[in-house]
Amino acid sequence: MVMQDGGTVDVRPGPDPGRAAPEHGSAYRTTALFLALYSGVLLAWTAYGITQGDGNVWDFLEGLFNPGAAPTTQILGPYEWAFTVGFLAIAGLALARRRVARSAALLSGWVLLAVSLREGVGLLDPAYRDLYGHDPLGGWVLATRGLGLVVALVALCTMFPATERRRGGHPSTPAADGPETWRRRPSRICGVLFLVMCLARLGWLVSDLTTPEGDVGRYLHDAVDGSVLGTLDLAAPSAFTTTGSVCALLVLGVLALRGRREVRGALLVFAALELYITVRTVVLLTVTDFFNRSFETPQGALSLVTTAYALSAMTSVVVLATGRGCGPYGAVRTEGLRTATVGRGGGL
């Protein structure tokens, strides 16, 4: 407490708005434990792939960003590598009971659940089930898939109830220039960037499927059936990753556009993943000399524009989602606004 202009002003720091309530601590710790465990399993598969390949660790590190540099096909793909790092980061944030980890953990749960459901559809094929019995690594792959399903259910069941309402409430229709509107504005910007990226990716997908070589039925079958490749592969095929990316961009974009600032963690994780994949694409275009030939055809020029937009948009989302001054839990506290008002005018 301090005295100012004859009045008493409370300058004691309030509760950390970015930290979850103590009653949700067990949910955050449980989710952190399972995500860290699954990340450890993926790291083990990565190490196994390096030892079984023709290259060394440095070759693998180069292959992380240069798709043409990997000496052999890895057991995991770039999306799995990205999610491994993402799971570890989410586990650390959840262990610290940061509220931003909640939506990121829910996103992870939905992704792992989709992977598990796709594998479940594949197991309906008897020939695919036999692969698990004949492949030397079949048991380990099945255990990994089973653990992924358990982690998905744990993340969804523990984090969904761990929601918190803002104290004090706020008007349902805040003023256009009020502080609540300013705090929601970065979320809406991220939503627009995500929805434009979703439309661009959907446009390319429709363009590919409407060619004479395109087959919508087969594409959808590849996206939802784990047995189509006929091998036990932990790396997700492009049909699944592209379809999942479009769905995630759409859902997160709509939520962010509605001002749902609590999805900041999911926006940050997915934008970082998309940024990593885009950087790999840029490296591939560079080493294949695509940039010098990109404007020879309209499709090449449009592809280059799409890649440039993805690079700038996802970078912008990462910056906006990590900003503390206007994020969902890093905004200026109400106590700070009240204290500043009192200091200037001597009263409320």
Image (spheres, helix red, strand yellow):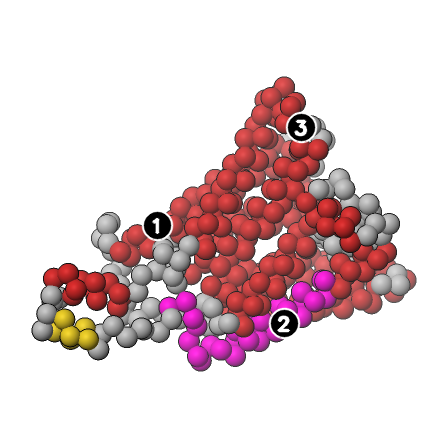
Mark-to-mark CA distance, 2 and 3: 42 Å
Secondary structure at badge 2 equals helix
Q: Is residue 145 magenta?
A: no
> Do the CB atoms of the residues marked 1 and 3 lie less than 8 Å apart?
no
Residue 148 located left or right of residue 30: right
- Mark 3, residue position: 290
Q: Main secondary structure of the magenta part?
A: helix
Crowding around mark 2 (Cα neighbors within 10 Å: few <14, some 14 to 19, many 20+) is many
| Above or below for 129 versus 33 | above
Secondary structure at badge 3 equals loop
- Mark 2, residue position: 34
**Residues in magenta?**
17-43
First reached walking from the N terminus: tag 2 or tag 3 = 2
Query: In the rendered image, is residue 227 in sight?
Result: no
Say which of 216 and 310 sits in front.
310
- Farthest residue toward the left? 6
- Farthest residue toward the top? 296
Q: Viewer-nearest of labels 2 and 3?
A: 3
User: Image point 68% across, 55% down: which residue?
Assistant: 80
Q: Which mark is residue 185?
A: 1
Mark-to-mark CA distance, 1 and 3: 37 Å
